[in-house]
Image (tube, rainbow, N blue to C red):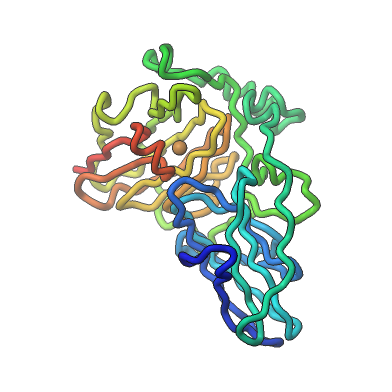
Amino acid sequence: MNGQSPTANWSAIAKAGERVRLRFIGASTATFFDVRIPGLKLKVISTDGQPVVPVEVDEFRIGSGETYDVIVDIPDDRAYTIFAQSMDRSGYARGTLSPRAGMQAVVPELDAPVLLEAVDMMGAMAQSGVGGMMGGMAMQSKVHHSRDEYGPGVDMRVDAPRLNLDDPGPGLRNNGRRVLSYADLKSSFAQPDGRAPTQEIELHLTGNMERFIWSIDGLKLNEARPIHFRKGERIRVILHNDSTMIHPMHLHGMWSDLQAPDGTFQVRKHTIAVQPAQRVSMLVTADAEGRWAFHCHLLYHMAAGMFREVIVA
Ligand SMILES: [Cu+2]
C-alpha cells in the first residue's frame, strides 16, 4: 500500500470522532484488490474522480486504473486495518488507521481462492429469471462474433452474455458482506450529453488463456485498424467479454458513460471493469481530437495486444 509491504504497514493517524476521506487508486500492474476495513462501513462517494450518490458498503473490488473515494467515520480510539486482498487470494496489501503511530489491528485471513461459476463462462445461460435467461435470449440474436474470433487465438466465445451490473464478481458473491457492484454506482449528476448515439461500435474482449494471447475481436493491436470517432459525435461502445477474466477497459481522452441494462445513464467512469461473459454498453462523446489509446488496464493483456487506437477527427 503506497509502496509499502504488508509488514511495513503504511499508516495514517485517525482519531475517534474523525471523518476520513480515503482515495483508493488501483495502481497495480495486473491485480484486482478486494478492499475492506473490518469494523468500519465504507461510504463510496466517487469513482474515477466523478461523484456518485453516496453508497455504504463493507467491501469493494478495485481494478487496475480504477479509483474510489471512500468516507469512513472513526468511532473508537483503536487501530483499523485497511485490508486489500488480491482477487486470486495469493496475498494482500494492508495499511492501518490508528489514533497514534505504531499501532496495528488484526489482519484478517485471506478468503478462499476464487472459483469461477457458471455465469462466468456461460453468461445469461446460467442465470434464471427475466433479467437473466430472458434478457440473455433477447440479446442472443444480436450477438455476432467477428470472423477473426474463430482461430487459435481465441478459446472462448459467449453467445448469451449477462447484462446485469448487480454482480460484485467472482469470489465476492454471497460472502456475508455488503459488496459494491456497478449497479450501486450512480453518478450524482445528470447524463452530461443526453443525445442519442449516432454510431454503435461493438468490441469483443478475446483471448486464449493457455497461449496467453489477448486481443479485441480476435485481433491484436498490430493486426487491427484504428477505430474512428467523428469529432463531436455521441457514440455507443459495446464491450462484450468473450473470456473468463475481468478486463478493466480504459479509454483515454474521453469519458465513458456506462449505461444500465435498461439503457439509462448509470455512472461516468474512465475505466470500466467488464466481468467474464458480461456485455456492457457505454456512451462516449468524441470531444477530444487526436489519437487515443483504448486498452485493457492489465499491463500484460495490454502488452499482448488487447488494445486499440481510437482516432477522433
Ligand atoms: Cu484484460
List x then y, in percent, for residue 98.
65, 81
For residue 130, above or below residue 105: above
Q: Is residue 129 left or right of residue 154?
A: right
Q: Quadrant of residue 283?
A: top left
The foreground one among 251 and 295 is: 295
Query: In this view of the protein, can residue 40 be seen by the observer?
Result: yes
List x then y, in percent, for residue 5.
53, 63
Quadrant location, ligand no. 1: top left
- Position of the C terminus, as image quadrant, is top left
User: As drawn, which residue projects farthest toward the right?
Assistant: 176
List x then y, in percent, for residue 225.
24, 28
Identify the residue at image location x=67%, y=29%: 119
For residue 227, above or below residue 83: above
Identify the residue at image location x=55%, y=17%: 141
Q: Is residue 202 left or right of residue 94?
A: left
Query: In this view of the protein, can residue 199 be seen by the observer?
Result: no
Q: Is residue 147 left or right of residue 91?
A: left
Identify the residue at image location x=61%, y=23%: 138
Identify the residue at image location x=43%, y=12%: 150
Report how many numbered discs are placed on residues in the image: 0
Q: Quadrant of residue 45?
A: bottom right
The foreground one among 27 and 238 is: 27
